[in-house]
Amino acid sequence: MKDLIKHKLAVAQYGTTNSEHQDSYLHRKRAADACYSSNNRLQYYIKKLSEHDTEYLTAVDNGHESRADTLASFIKQDEDTIAVAQVDFDADQSVHEQLTGEKWTGIRSTKAKTNHLTADERAEMEARMSLRRAS
């Protein structure tokens, strides 16, 4: 698990915009997106397991042994997949918490967070804009 977290953290922090504030935002956003995706995947497989459980019980009640055997195989696959998806989600949550200091909840913050440029970043941007205007 530690290696998985280390690699996911490296992916979340990959690349730079040469702006510490912008990089921080992009890294946090990438970590939140990973949590969102892995949570959706986990929830999808949990739903499939529930559906297969229901179908299995119906097949058993109706004496359809062959169908019940097939569904039992699906249920085993679902359980194995859920275990992997849970590890993936846990690792994504760990990365998110390391980058934001907060546990990912899936609920977006309603208050705007402004990342102001430093004086040096603002001066650099103004210089680039002046060059574009001169072209």
Image: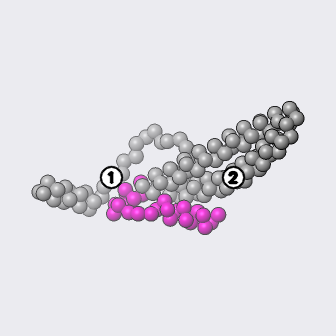
Pick out the residue farthest to the left.
Answer: 134
Q: Position of residue 132 (x, y in %)?
A: 17, 56
Q: Is residue 94 above or below residue 55?
A: below
Q: Would you say residue 60 sits in the magenta stretch?
A: no
Provide the major secondary structure of the magenta segment: helix
Q: Nearer the viewer, mark 2 or mark 1?
A: 2
Residue span colored magenta = 1-25
Q: In the rendered structure, which amino acid carries the disc numbered 2?
A: Thr
Q: What residue is drawn where x is 58% and y is 50%?
A: 38
17 with respect to 40 (left or right): left
Q: Quadrant of residue 128?
A: bottom left
Front residue of 131 and 72: 72
Name which of mark 2 and mark 1 comes first in the sequence: 2
Q: Position of residue 29 (x, y in %)?
A: 46, 52
Identify the mark at residue 81; answer none if there is no mark.
2
Q: Position of residue 42 (x, y in %)?
A: 64, 47
Identify the mark at residue 116; answer none if there is no mark.
1
